[in-house]
Image (cartoon, rainbow, N blue to C red):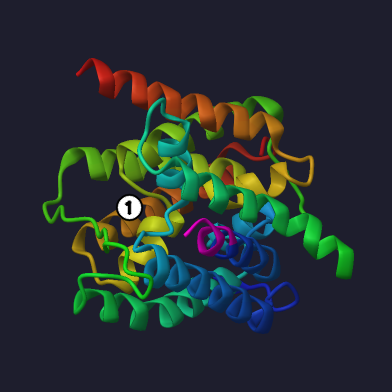
Amino acid sequence: MTIDWASFTPLTATAGGALIGAAAALLLLMNGRIAGISGILGTAMQKGSRDRGWRIAFIAGLMLAPWLWSLFAALPSALLEATPAWLVIAGLLVGFGSRLGSGCTSGHGVCGIARLSPRSLMATATFMATGFLMVYLLKHVIGGGA
Amino acid sequence: MIPTAFASGLLFGFGLLLAGMANPAKVQAFLDLAGAWDPSLMLVMGGAIAVAAPAFAWAKRHQRTLLGASLELPQARHLDRRLLLGAALFGAGWGMAGICPGPALVLLAQGKALIFVLAMLAGMGLHAFVNGKR
């Protein structure tokens, strides 16, 4: 394993993580809900789902963040390397998988681990493992592609 | 409680942007253990968990939130096939694109990753459809 020290951003990563944690704490302490994006989004989309209001408000806040950020500073670079065909497959897997598994990086990876849920620990270990495996296959076995 | 949900979403979005989570190439560099590995995202998770954990510890000892709403924490305890299969599929997609649901929406708001978001919403819809038939 070689660590890419030039790309390593410990300060902004930790500070950004702390903001994410603060957002999850805020939603929990005020609204009593888990800040799991796949659950908030998936339930908000379902017809006649309960408590749609706070879910839509959360998503609106999330999506206004880049705009508000851009008023004060340049947005950080966002580089997508996957081809459109890969993006379709990846999106389907992320959407279907996160709903089947009742969570994603935020619900399981942050909130679930923060409350020491055994299900979330297992889910996080599983999606990290398949994430590592998929990137290994794409970058070092198939090559090019994504 | 709409304003607090909005504020939480906004804060979450700033966090993703600052942390580098809204950059798919950086996420994939974290997942690329065999290449030039960028460990930053471990600190994102660590930082987020460290800040959120005290709030969850508080929630375990209370019935109501500071605003008087009911605390709705997941009750399921058992590990089942759906959890593991779902997480495995999710991780595979996350690795392929370097995008998970939160960053997907932050990217969409910047006019990026539209194809991914449409496919993700279709995947969620497909799950709701299959679930409804069961």
Q: Which of A25 and B15 is in front in this view?
A: A25
Instruction: Report which quarter residue A124 is drawn in.
Output: bottom left
Q: Position of residue B10 (x, y in %)?
A: 63, 62
Chain assignment, label 1: A
Quarter of the image with the C terminus of chain B is top left
Task: Determine whether the residue tagged by mark 1 lies in a helix, strand or loop.
Answer: helix
Q: Nearer the viewer, residue A110 or B86?
A: A110
Q: Position of residue B5 (x, y in %)?
A: 51, 59
Identify whether B118 is placed above or below A24.
above
Left or right: B112 as drawn, with respect to A118: right
Identify whether B98 is placed above or below B37.
above
Specify whether residue B94 is in view. Answer: yes
Q: Where is residue A40 in the image (x, y as percent from the top left)?
A: 44, 46
Q: Is the magenta stretch mostly helix, strand or loop?
A: helix
Identify whether A37 is placed above or below B134.
below
Left or right: A47 as drawn, with respect to A74: left
- Which residues, given as a range, are shown in magenta? B1-6
The residue lying at 58 percent from left, 75 percent from top is A19
Residue under label 1, please give it. Answer: A126
Q: Nearer the viewer, residue B132 or A91?
A: B132
For the residue marked with disc 1, what is the amino acid? Thr
Specify whether residue B89 is in view. Answer: no
